[in-house]
Image (cartoon, rainbow, N blue to C red):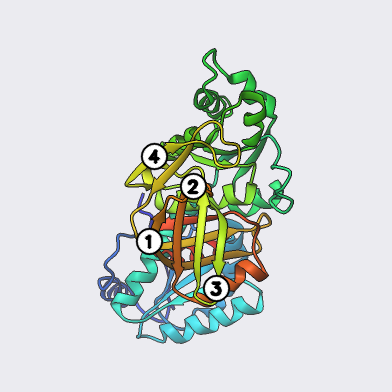
Amino acid sequence: MKKIAIYRLASPRHTPEQLNTFTQEFLSTLHVEYELKGDDFTDYGSHALDVIFICTGGIEATFMNMLPDLRQKSSRPFYLLASGRNNSLSASMEILSYLRQQSIVGEIIHGDEEYVDYRLRLLEQAGEARQKLRGYRLGIIGKPSDWLISSHADPVVVKQNLGVDLIDIPMEELFNHLPENKSIYAALEGILNDYQLQGFTLRCFDLIDRLHDTACLPVARLNAHGYVAGCEGDVPTMLSMAIVRSLFDVSGFLTNSATINPETGELLFVHCTIPLDMVERYELDTHFESGVGTGVRGFMKEGPVTVFKVSGDLKRHFIAEGRLVMNLALPNLCRTQQVIQLSDRMQAHYFLTDPIGNHHVVIPGHHADILEELLKSN
């Protein structure tokens, strides 16, 4: 099944031959793979991206009558594909205006070939990520660490908006899964398999007191193996990492904010773990705060990055593009250390005036457009 489905609305004033000609001439300008559904809306809402081609004018009332059924099939935004002929754009604008009056999100996709292709590819990627997220099971192993007083989430809201199930797992479960060699990695892998999880966040500091060891390296390895593995029981950051995983097939670097220069937009992000598939090389050291166990000092390739975070109620998010300018190895900080220069230095004020908790996620590359699109579509 193709990821993009294109449905058609057209006025009966035109003959079938004329409508087929209009359709073929316009759709031949697209450079994306799609399946043309024509006038059959039976499986509308089941693809990564469902688009309605407004082939002609005079179909506004038809769309209005179809709307209740289409909303039952899908709660996603409406994407109206408009050509420059047969009053296609005019009809699309009238429909979008009506949708707005009903508080329904929609967009007209119209412009030159390059722009239309760009929007369709972006929306397809966001839709595919939404499909991946639906059915995710993410474990909360132990409750959030005591200092994370704002880092919780409502399971009902998360399920409704992302399709993700949050599974509470007592901390004792991890200790019960420990093999004779006390391998934290094996215990976490056992929980992932037993609970059929795609990821977890772990109240990891409990391991220092109980086992005199840390989960920094196991978390780094599990992230590299395709799971979402978060720290300190931080649920919003785990959700942020799951969104990143669904889009880019990496979990992202879960960071602490060490220093911020609001005048220059330069940030220092640190943590004692980073996914091993995100770094060019890494070193092992002790865990910074405790001086025991293993911490990971990873060196990520310098270049474009995106800083990202969603709130636990999914009502807020932060996205900032920038550049990783250097990796540090200072002895008095968490072991992985990244100096990031934000493209818009004014965004640094967010961290000092309205942050979504402490932890944020760093992703290689500039991805503001696709992240905004995915979050807008939920």
Question: Height in image: 134 above or below 211?
Answer: below
The three-letter amino acid code for the residue at tag 1 is: Gly
Q: Which residue is mark 2?
A: 331
Task: Say left or right for 142 vs 197.
Answer: right
Residue 151: x and y in percent read: 68, 51
Question: Height in image: 218 above or below 144?
Answer: above
The three-letter amino acid code for the residue at tag 4 is: Glu
Q: Secondary structure at mark 1?
A: loop
Q: Secondary structure at mark 3?
A: helix
Q: CA distance from mark 4 to mark 1?
A: 23 Å
User: Disc 4 vs disc 1: Cβ atoms closer than 8 Å?
Assistant: no
Q: Which residue is mark 1?
A: 365
Say which quadrant the C terminus sits in: bottom right
Q: CA distance from mark 3 to mark 4?
A: 32 Å
Q: Which residue is mark 4?
A: 283
Residue 343, quarter of picture: bottom left
Q: CA distance from mark 2 to mark 3?
A: 28 Å
Q: CA distance from mark 1 to mark 3?
A: 18 Å
The three-letter amino acid code for the residue at tag 3 is: Gln
Mark 1 against mark 2, which lies toward the viewer?
A: 2
Taking the view exactly as shown, the residue that stands out farthest to the top is 180
The tag earlier along the polypeptide, 2 or 3, is: 2
Q: Residues within 10 Å of mark 4 (few under 14, many from 20)?
A: few
Q: Secondary structure at mark 2?
A: loop
Q: Which residue is mark 3?
A: 347
Residue 69, quarter of picture: bottom right
